[in-house]
Image (spheres, rainbow, N blue to C red):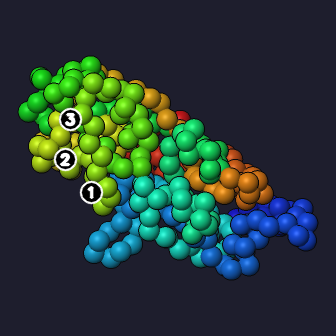
Amino acid sequence: MKKILITLTLFLSTLSANAETKLQEIIKNGELRVGTTGDWDPMTMKDPATNKYKGFDIDVMNELAKDMGVKVRYVPTDWKTIVSGITAKRYDISTSVTKTPKRAEVAGFTDTYYKYGTVPLVLKKNLKKYSTWDSLNNKKVTIATTLGTSQEEKAKEFFPKSKLKSVEAPARDFQEVLSGRADGNITSSTEANKLVITYPQLAIVPDGERNPAFLAMMVGKKDTVWNDYVNKWIKDKKASGFFETLLTKYNLKSL
């Protein structure tokens, strides 16, 4: 904690009097505003009974706020608007998203701290019919995606012959598969491993992962001071074993 406070003091002392950065604003207001979707298990999940958030990313953001000596406030968003929330300055930082060229055009990204692959999900009873990625690339197949996600973009590449169906939050693509309105969907291997436990009627297509993707927090594109501060924090927390402890807690693979 002492090391983090010293780092924060050094960052602030290097700023000019006229510099504008979220770092100064957060310290002045005593609050870190975090945009999060609350629908990605186990990264960020909102408990409807309590309206409180929990998950890997939530633990990360709580720790960042604690080390900065400020309170944390979670700002609800969805995948369609999570990027615009950063550009419109509705929050100071987001919980993790996949780094994509399209997002990087308008938003800044911190260093990564987790990597995952992409896998298809289908109904378990249909596994013989859909046992490979290629079997889902068919004009008679409907693939569901969630609007605004990186998977929505990738589905066009993976399944150019299939009918693509995007659903808008709070609906989720896997629900279309469960209901029979879609034959499959693609999601992170992290979420897929959780979903097949929660919904045993779902199964992961046993054809391997594709599209290795790196997660990072989003910040303002031109705010290098705030970005550099968070990157230094991530580096220090990696060295301290904080992220390894979280990976174990949530049964996730190391980078």
- The three-letter code of the residue at mark 2 reads Glu
Res. 133 image quadrant: top left
**In the foreground, 211 or 103:** 103
- The three-letter code of the residue at mark 3 reads Thr
What residue did someone put label 3 on? 142
**Tag 2, which secondary structure?**
helix
Badge 2: residue crowd in 10 Å (few <14, some 14–19, many ≥20):
many
Marks 3 and 2 close (CB-CB < 8 Å):
yes
What residue did someone put label 2 on? 176
Q: Which-is-in-front pick, marks 1 and 3? A: 3
Tell me which label, 3 or 2, sits earlier in the chain. Answer: 3
**In the foreground, 130 or 234:** 130
Residue 171 is tagged as 1
Tell me which label, 1 or 3, sits earlier in the chain. Answer: 3
Q: Is residue 82 left or right of residue 227?
A: left
Rendered view: 136 above or below 217? above
Tell me which label, 2 or 1, sits earlier in the chain. Answer: 1
